[in-house]
Image (cartoon, coloured by chain):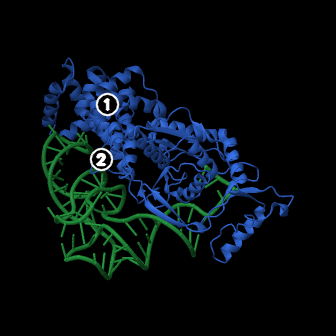
Amino acid sequence: MKTVATRFAPSPTGPLHIGGVRTALFNWLYSKNKGGKFYLRIEDTDKERSKDEFKNQIINSLKWIGIYYEDNVYIQSDKIDDHINVANELLKKGLAYKCYCSSEEIEEQKKRAKQKKIPYIYNRKWRDKSETDAPKDIEPVIRFKSKVEGKSILKDLVQGKIEIENNTIEDFVILRSDGSPTYNLSASVDDHLMGMTHIIRGDDHKINTFKQIQIYNALNWKVPSFAHIPLIHTIEGKKLSKRDNASTLDDYSKIGIMPNALRNYLLRLGWSYKDKEIFNLDESIKYFNMEGIGKSPSKLDISRIYSMNEYYIKNINENDLFNFLINYCETFQENIPDLAQKKIKKSLHFLKNKAKTLEDIYKNSKFLINDNVKIERDDKKLLDETAIKIIKLFSDDTNKLSNFTRENLEPIINNLIKKNNTNFKGVGQPLRICLTGSRFGPGIYDILCALGKKEVSKRLSQIG
RNA sequence: GGUCCCUUCGUCUAUCGGUUAGGACACAUGGUUUUCAUCCAUGAAAGAGGGGUUCGAUUCCCCUAGGGACCGCCA
């Protein structure tokens, strides 16, 4: 049995979105599960629309989420000569032919078909026509002689048997009039040359598969196995497109979603293994299989992404979390000075408690990063006379302490509550506002201990 | 319009002919934490509709409805 080889083959004509990443993930996981290889191929044969910027974005996205490919990136345009040679071979063998229809002629036919409400299909005009009839002023395209009779059957690993009448597939173009190869040719040739055994791709390629299988068969190549996975839909139920908000990985990383959480979410979107929800990397590889892939499209649900991220924040190793956090801050927020980093690291155990994203942790950490407390106008209103009085009392009472611990602070705060005939909120809220500038945030004891006595008295002295 | 595919709680899904149709997210309620959040408990919530096959269908078959994808000298 041949070693499993899969590939992800995006075109760099737009930013890679989350659906493409899932396709890459499934391919990668499948190959790893089988002890096989996974490759990245950039399909850049559309010169007009392909951009380096998108190629880099694709590469960076895969890197960010932790999908690793063999060797270097395959660039499809490097292999154009191979594709052209195959086209000429097909031509020589009589399996393809030159078509001299002008684009105006084709457009006209399409228009007429639309008017008559009949499906357009190229009329195979030049399939059997002699080239001596060829007009001089037209550069021909090369079309593949597609089967006209009978049916084709695709045994899809996800969708099962799919049957189609051959006459619904037209004689598709394999070489453009400028001599460049088209997608169906290039993809087939590359997949064959790269030794792909399994092709896992979006549902939207299903019809192409019938064309590509014909190319394989015409050349006596071994046909790989195909698996067409359902597309990811927006919450409105439409195919996810590059224009949709929050569709690239960047959209998620900038709000502080971690790669392992998103990977886990994407894995479970359209795939399942019993009732298991959390899959670490090893488990993802160990359990991934085709049987678990669902047949119906699934909708993207941001609240599940948040909740998955929250799970990872609370359950991964704190060192790893810290590294993710610093990295996130440097990329999307600000550089954290060493001293503040140390404080954050020590306090991470409580900073992470209230967070669904790295951005939340960053916000919770702000009182450790910035020494000057800026109080919002709304919060300032809460600092009335009694509040300021309580803060003064707190300062006086804690003056005697040599350092701050929960144990020695608790009796002081309890005492303040009692004496001033208030509740915990009456003491805690003004303290938090003065120390952090916000009504929301970590527990008050956590804040006090993390800042330490000196810093607390400094911040409190600036009030009132 | 043609071809193909899909259809279980709001969402992601389990079930591979016999279950009080299970789990997770979200939601609601209650409890713990002397704020918020966490955490815990509880609750509400689904087999698109109609025919078959069968002792028995969410599960198998057919029809209808709804949804989606594709129909480029794009990939």
Quadrant where the N terminus of chain A lies? top left
Q: Position of residue A277 (x, y in %)?
A: 30, 47
Whether residue A382 is visible here, answered yes or no, is no
Q: SS at mark 2?
A: loop
Residue sitting at x 33%, y 51%: A272
Q: Which one is nearer the viewer's eye here, A431 or B40?
A: B40
Quadrant where the C terminus of chain A lies? top left
Label 1: chain letter: A
| Chain letter tied to blue | A
Q: Residue beneath label 1, please?
A: A435
Q: Which one is nearer the viewer's eye here, B10 or A463?
A: B10
Q: Residue A128, relative to residue A322: is it above or below?
A: below
User: Considering only order in the chain, which callout, 2 or 1, is on the residue closer to the N terminus?
Assistant: 2
Q: Residue A256, relative to residue A276: is it above or below?
A: above
Q: Which one is nearer the viewer's eye here, B11 or B73?
A: B73
Spatial separation of the CA atoms under disc 1 and disc 2: 40 Å
Q: Position of residue A186 (x, y in %)?
A: 63, 47
Q: Residue A399, relative to residue A31: is it above or below?
A: above
Q: Which one is nearer the viewer's eye here, A268 or A137?
A: A137
Q: Check disc 2 and give the amino acid type.
A: Glu
Q: SS at mark 1?
A: helix
Q: Do the numbered discs 1 and 2 sit on residues whose CB atoms are within 8 Å?
A: no
Residue sitting at x 74%, y 56%: A141
Relative side of A69 to A168, left or right: left
Q: Residue beneath label 2, please?
A: A277
Q: Check disc 1 and give the amino acid type.
A: Leu
Residue A449, image quadrant: top left
| Chain letter tied to green | B
Relative side of A344 to A328, left or right: left
> Callout 1 environment at 10 Å: few (<14), some (14 to 19), or many (20+)?
many
> Callout 2 environment at 10 Å: few (<14), some (14 to 19), or many (20+)?
few
